[in-house]
Each structure stands twice: as C-alpha cells, then as structure tokens.
Image (spheres, coloured by chain):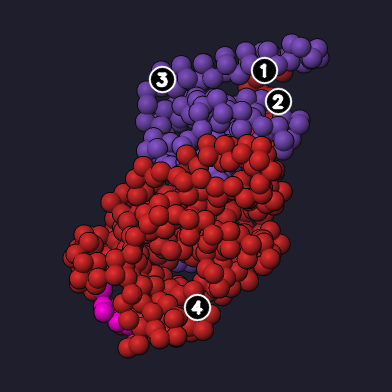
Chain colours: A red, B purple
Amino acid sequence: MSIETKLKKEFEQYKQAVSCPPSVDSRMMALYRSHMVQTREGPSMLRKWNLPRLAVITVLAATLLGFTYAGMSFLFEESKGNISVTMSAISEEVTLNKEQLTSISRSLADVKEQLQIGENALVYFADLEGEEVLQGKPLFPVSRPAVNENLENWKLSIPHAGVADSVPSNILDDFLFEGGMKGSPFGLFFSDSFTETLDELKRESKDTGKKVVWRKEVSSSEGPLNIFTSIYRNSKQQAIYVGVETSSEKISIKGIIPSSSSYETLNINGSQAHYTRDDNSLFSTSLTYQEVMWMEIHEGQTFVYRVASDSSAITKEQLVQAAKGL
Amino acid sequence: MKEIDIQPWLIRMSQGDEEAFQIVYQMTRDHTYRFIYYLVPNKQDVEDVMSEVYLELLRSADNYVPDQKFRAWFNGLIIRQVRNWKRKGWRRFRIWDRVQRASSDESDRAAAEQFAALDNQLELLPIVSTLPLHLKEVVILRYYQDHSLEEIAQLLQIPIGTVKSRHHRALKRLRHQYQGKESGTGANEYVY
C-alpha cells in the first residue's frame, strides 16, 4: 500500500474519534456576543485580537485545576481590548472536600504568618498527591503583600490616574478604607519556575517525613497583570475588596469555580458584569468568596474591576451597590 | 461543509445576524475542531485556537469572495491562526501546566503518545503529529482535506514549488520513520 493511500485511510479511520465537544458551543456563542457588543460600541473600541502573549490564571475556587477535566462547563468569556476573561465551572466530584480545604487554608495561613511583608512562598502538601484534581502537583503559592494604610499615598502609588482618582475613602457608607495592596489576596499567579520547586519540596518531604513543607520563593517580577486592591472594612470586621486589574500585554485570565457556586450576569453602569459566589474557596479563611466582575475601556486601556468579599454575611446586593457607586 | 449551502449564511453573518453565525458555526465546528486538533501539538490548546478562528471569521467574513471555494478559504484562515498561535509565543499560565512551551522533543513525544493512547491501529498519524508545522500543514491539507498541491499553494500563499518540496520531504520523513518503526516487528505490509 502506498503511504499516500495509508495516510488517507488513517485520516478517514480516525475522523470519528475526534469531534468537537458540546461544551465548546456555549463558549463560541458567548464569544460571538461579546464580539458583537464590542463592534456596536464603535470602531475606536474595536481592537484586533492578536493572540495574547501571556495568560494569567486567577483562581477563585477552592481547588487548583487544570483545564482538561471532563464535566467542565463554560460560564462566560469577556474580551475587551488586550484582556480576555474566561470562567468555567467544574464538577464537584473532582474538587477537594471541606475538610481538605480547611486544612489547606489553615496551613497556608500558618505559612503566611511566618513571612515578612513582601515575601512569597510555595507550600507542598504530600497528602494531596493522590488527588485527581491536582494532577500530582499539590503545590500552593502564598504571599504576604505590603498594605498601604494611607489613602493618599495609596492613590499616588497607582500609576493610572483614572483608577487612582476613583479610589473612595469609604463605600456603602460604613465600610472605611483600611489599606491598599498590589496584587490580590485571592487567586494565584503561577510561574513555570514553580515546577522546579515542586520537585525539590517533594524530595524534602520524602527525606524529612513532613507532610507539609514550604520554602520562600523569589519572584523575578510582578507578573504580566497589574492588580491594585483597595480594602474596606466595617465595624463588624466584614471586608469588601475593590480590585482593578490591567496589563500592557495581551493576556487571558482563566478561572474555575466548583459547579456548586452561584453565577449570575448583571449590569453595572451599562457594562455586562458577572457575579459569582463560591462557598468552598481555598483563599478565604471563611471558605466564602464572592465577587462582581466587569470590564471597561478608558482612554484605550482595558481595566478589569472586581468588587469582592470573603464574608458570607455580605450580600450580592451590597456588592452590586458598591460596584455601581464606584 | 457544502460550498453552496454556506454562502448565504456567511453573507447574513457578516451583516450581524446571530442565527446565521450559529448556522455557520454548526456547519463548520467539527471540521474546525478536527483540523486544529491535527495541527497543534498540545491538545489543550484546541479550544483556544478555535476561539481565535471564529473571531477571525467574524472579522474577515467581509473579505470572503463568493467566487472562492469556502472550504479552501476557511482552511487558510485556520492555518493562519494556528501559525499565529505558534509564532507569537502564546504562553499560558495554566494551573499545573508549564508556562514555557515544551521543547520540540517533549511535545513530539506527547503528541505521539496521545495518538497511540487513543487508537493502537493508527501507524502513520502518530508520526504525522511529530512533523514540523510547515510539513504537517501540507500533509493534512493533502490527505485529510484532499486539496490539490495547487490549491495548497494558493491557500498557504506560497509557491507551488515550495509546496511540492515540503510534500516530498514530509512523505520521505514519514516513510523513513514508519519503516524504521516496522523493521523490528516483522511487518507484513510494505509501505512505499
């Protein structure tokens, strides 16, 4: 048989084994609608979508996941300017249970206490090696960013005048400015250098018998996404976090939440917004994380806004009201 | 994809008709998915590249001339998006995935393993997956999409001589690697 004939035969034979999964369909329709919204906003708002150079994962969920799990359902995709944000939900069957989440959360908090301000660390959990959802890489970054408690100094440190000017001294009347930080207290930024550290920590765990081992990690840069988070707190110690994200590069932000999370689309001052609430969040000591997210373009720059809380007592309506008041 | 059936929907789609986009998408989705699947080494990228393809389709639908064969025009669009993906160094921070693109050796092994895992009866496709992109394109366009070498030259916007050269080199590599694989197993089939 000629190689040409064999090639044709194998392509034909293999054709039925490769077909487009139905989960892709909703993503494509969302993409279409997002594109049409941008097109209607006018030519000045339309950016040719060249492939982003970099993607940052913002994890809102309790578990850290790859993107190849069966049972993932697409929630939304928003693309404006140089930033694209995608959110998917994953089956509860592959997420970690509450006990595991609580244990991880406590261990991360313990490590955080041992860090100096501005330091980062990577924490390895040997007992989570067998968890399918972590795909053999039970490694979690943790950081202790500096918090600027002076509102005016915080505003001065934000390079975007429009963003800086809009940082209020209080929101919803009784939530007062507590501090501002670069980065987000929720979600993670991953680097390929973590893989090398993972191997070293695995060896250390094996050699010492410790189930949780960690080491400080030196970040070579802040990463491609610039995040400015302003923290507001009320007398009940409930917090609302107002985050603004921007980048000079073309990036894609992908997040995953458990399918048990709540999701709803909203409108914030004319922009399509997305509300999510996850009550199994690893990055919240209360295990609750909820946020309202939307995107805007100002003077050619794309901004991702997040108004969030780790307090289960804060309602969606409060977050929406806070968002609309910005 | 039937050439005649899709054209009216393309025109309506370019005028902002959502239903038309849905129909164009449904008519092309499996083809697009498979085509990208064969071309990209990391199968996790297929859906992302697919997004780029349909975004580009929306942007450039006005450029489609009805006299052209849609299939060839669309295949050219897909190939350009896959090349963009590769060329611009799309680095993705995925959870637990390496940020840097794997070395060509690593991705060759990963690609071949994926085919092998899925169907032990395939002998050539796993080897095709390890070809460099510029050779893989010609093989897939010729033997999966049944384009003539002249059509491939037009679609890829390269000289026909270049297409013939790449085609020749691709088949030579396939024969060499296939026969090298078979020589130790006493194959009862000679592929020439």
Do pointers 3 and 4 mark residues of a single chain? Answer: no
Crowd rating for badge 4 (residues with CA inside 10 Å; few <14, some 14–19, many 20+): some
Q: Which quadrant of the figure has residue A6? A: top right
Crowd rating for badge 1 (residues with CA inside 10 Å; few <14, some 14–19, many 20+): some
Label 3 sits on residue = B162
Label 4 sits on residue = A311
Amino acid marked by disc 2: Glu
Q: Which part of the image, by quadrant, shows the C terminus of chain A?
A: bottom left
Q: Residue at x 67, y 32 (%)?
A: B113
> What secondary structure is the stretch in magenta mostly built from?
loop
Find the distance from the CA under tag 3 to the CA under tag 2.
27 Å
Secondary structure under badge 3?
A: helix
Kindly indicate whether the residue at mark 2 contacts the one at mark 1 (C-beta within 8 angstroms): yes
Q: Nearer the viewer, residue B85 or B97?
A: B97
Across and down, in percent, residue A163 comes to: 24, 68
Kindly indicate whether the residue at mark 3 contacts the one at mark 1 (C-beta within 8 angstroms): no
Across and down, in percent, residue B152 comes to: 46, 30
Label 1 sits on residue = B178
Choose the circle earlier in sequence order: 1 or 2. Answer: 2
Amino acid marked by disc 3: Thr
